[in-house]
Amino acid sequence: MILYLGRRLLGMLGVLLAVAAITFLIFYVLPSDPAAAACGKSCSTERLEAIRAHMGLDQPLWRQFGDFVTGIFTGRTFGSGPYALDCSFPCLGYSYENAQPVWDLLVDRLPVSASLAVGAALIWLALGLGAGVTAALRKDTLTDRALMVGAVAAASLPVYFTSVMLIYGLIRVAGLLPYPQYVPFGSDPLSWASNLLLPWLALAILYAAMYARQSRSSMIESMAEPYIRTARAKGLPRRTVVVKHGLRAAMTPILTIFGMDLGGLLAGAVITESIFGLPGVGRLFYGALTTGDQPVILGVTLLAATFIVVANLCVDLLYAVVDPRVRY
Amino acid sequence: MDQHKRNILAVAVVTALSLGAAGCSGGGTGANGGPGKGGANPATGNLGKVVGGAPAKGGTLTVLSNQDFTHLDPARNWVMGDMDFGTRLLYRTLLTYKAEPGAKGGELSPDLAEDLGTSSNGAKTWTFRLKKGLKYEDGSPVTAQDVKYNVERSFSPDLPGGPDYAARYLAGAEGYQGPAGGKHLDSVKTPDDHTIVFELRKPFAEFPYATVLPTFAPVPKSQDKGPQYDNRPFSSGPYKIESYARDKQLVLVRNPHWDPKTDGVRKAYPDRIVVTMGLKGNQIDDRLITGSGADASAVSWVNLRPESTPKVLTKPDVRARLLAESTNCTEMLQMHTGRAPFDDVKVRQAVQYALDRQSVLTASGGPALNEPATALMPGSLFEGGKQPDTLKIPPTGDVDKAKQLLKEAGKPGGFSTSITVSTGDKAVAEAVQQSLGRAGIKVTIETVDPSAFYDTIGDTKNRTDLTYTGWCPDYPSGSTFLPFVFDGRYIKEKGNSGNHSLFRDEPTMKRMDEIAAMTDAAAANKAWQELDGQILAKAPTAPVVVERKPLLVGPNVAGAFGHTSFGGQIDYATIGLKDPSKSGS
């Protein structure tokens, strides 16, 4: 188990390093120049060179990458003299666009994305699993068909469509909810929830539909296993059979996609955050893309990669808990 | 400077995601052209007027925005709306613009300085005396040395992005890298705490206009935190920053040490100003059209989106809350005059004649919010605040004349070319494509992400023949327009900006130098206007439209007008609320 964990952690580091290297390379070949963007209009060549030197862009690529990687572990300083910028551990670079270290920006935005992701995940798990299990248990009935047709329909709706429809229906026409504007959980939990309800729904509808389909087929499969028949034959209550024996085994594939989905969403739901104007990591990323703020793009990419590999590891470890047959 | 367009991407999410346009720096005086030909423009009913009457003191004014400020550090602030916000609320400059609607907004008023400055040595030396009793937010006095310090800061490579007038005009500024290394500019002298003297390298009669720019705001050395200063500028104005979460929210509260007796321009009506950022453009529009609850005391930072225009213009009570001052920026179809086929003036003229400005105008927001351009410089730089119709080409173009010009140029069958536009201007490019196609000019469209747009078109060797950009004067003078856009000596092979037609014409450059040396402002003004027509006849660009800045204000907002010198952005010096108790604080 310990050995397994160690191997996995080492592998994770490798993946993250590769992601960072590839992202770095992509920037290198892209046409946009952050120094020119910072310099503004009617920028003289000398001034551009000075800015480039200050940002460290005059260094060769391998050197920039090396500085970046060591900076994560040791922190680093940008520029020199009285205007030197201190970027302490874990330094993911400095956003000249926002005049802040990338790490601080991420830490600042993460609660928003996490609120969105976790809230939506709870909703879609409840809706998706509920619908999927119900449909599986009533396989080939009208309920099953209706639920699955609904799921296909919901899964085909892109999130930007659902969002706009929800805004139109619940805010503009019905006036039930406010235009979402993020309120930190700590300052007012109730308005935190009421402001996030719509984004949660918009995201959850899409995922719930996919989870319903996944859990239905998974559940049908596990309910056909011989041990279910055994459990039934022993005279266990139906509830116990379904939940403890059927659902538990059916959870394995669902857990896999759930880990990936949640991991990805924690690092920002770009479209949802942008549509609802939530200042999360996704919108930070979107803003960075449009302004060519490379350190932020790199930081968010790494954050997303980290979340996904960590989520994967957690899922693999959870397998052992969910499914007694799995051992490391 | 260039009109920075942030009409951002789209792909499949165009309606849901498109943000409004960002500002551009510069300004301009002058009334507006008023309604276009053919009936009153429903969008311009408030031109020259103050919306909402006189404000009462107090309350919270909310500003709804889809974006963060580019820079609030006065050494780096060179985006028109941001300059308005910064200099009207947070820091004072040597001079500023009067807080009045219409052409009066182009006139100067003393701010930190006692008067409009005195020149000597043939307009090469400018002296400003600071008022007594000016204080920062901590009660410490504002000194002439602090103004000098910020001018010096603007040279730092660590603090890029700001106006470069100081660099362009101050003597001995070549190669100067800011005060961080302990070096100072000898050409800015501070004989005492209340006197500042600027030595210029050449006579510059319009220097007082340049001192309106945030470069000439005070920054005390003890507060300077380099690039981090952007997040917390130290206030010398009526408000100070309570909190600033980048791209989320900025909260301003009163600066108790600001003395209204020293300030003839700012009224500082609200107690608090809250800027909420990162909202969606369509949601801002909807909230302000409804205007209920706290939104009644809110204003929009970004342009009303073209899709929302009908919802506003058809309702008289909402329309009454729409400001639509001219941006005074001319959008132009730029032709690469440095190579075939656009090195031939006849070909370029053919484009001018073939272009259907009316359809481009429709593509960029409709006639209520744009006017077809009939000259290069915007109306604010002409007599009566209106562009002359120099070429007398009908707004929909003259295809026969274009075909004839092409025939004379030896291209009777037309030719193929391509245009680069920012993603948000795709509809404009299509209108250009369609209208030039009428004369046999086949245009291929290349769209570029806004973040890479200026880099792409600034690469003069590899860029396309055509591109679409605008220019706004930095202050009401032709000297901030024509030389930036048409002086061939400013062309750079890479990172080219301003002169996107790569126009290099000896008589034009000679004339520009002559006008720049004129000491009689009125004569210079006249000369720029004449030169405008002369350049237009040589057809380096085809002027297309002059846009308005449509901004909605809530029903409880008072004292609101679009300021002509800040690109039509609301003048934050005089805005306030009708009934502060309704603003929820």
Image: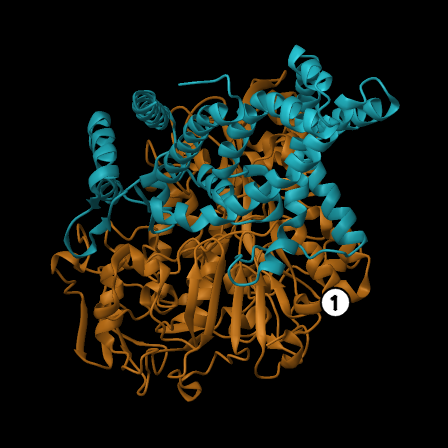
Chain colours: A cyan, B orange
Q: Which residue is at the front of the view, B542 or B146?
A: B146
Q: Is residue B84 above or below residue A321?
A: below
Q: Is residue B216 above or below residue A229?
A: below
Whole-percent x, y for residue A62 in the image = 22, 25
Quarter placement of the N terminus of chain A: top left
Q: Residue furthest left?
A: B182
Q: Is residue B412 above or below residue A37?
A: above
Whole-percent x, y for residue B235 in the image = 36, 72
Chain of the residue where label 1 is placed in the rendered structure? B
Whole-percent x, y for residue A244 in the image = 63, 27
Q: Which residue is at the front of the view, B270 or B97?
A: B270
Residue B304 visible in the displayed image: no
For the point 31% across and 26% down, which residue is it?
A13
Q: Classify residue B560 by image quadrant.
A: bottom right
For the point 51% across and 29% down, which residue is it?
A259
On the picture, is B356 further left or further right than B57?
right
Query: Tag 1: residue type?
Result: Ala
Q: Which residue is at the front of the view, A53 or A73?
A: A73
Density class for disc 1 (Cα within 10 Å; few <14, some 14-19, many ≥20) is many
Q: In the rendered image, which residue does mark 1 sit on?
A: B320
Quarter placement of the C terminus of chain A: top left
Whole-percent x, y for residue B36 in the image = 72, 54
For the point 50% across and 32% down, which residue is it?
A264
On the picture, is A106 further left or further right than B276?
left
Q: Residue furthest top?
A: A226
Q: Is residue B58 above or below residue B430?
A: below
Q: Which residue is at the front of the view, A231 or A225?
A: A231
Residue A127 visible in the displayed image: yes
For the point 21% across and 55% down, which residue is it?
A83
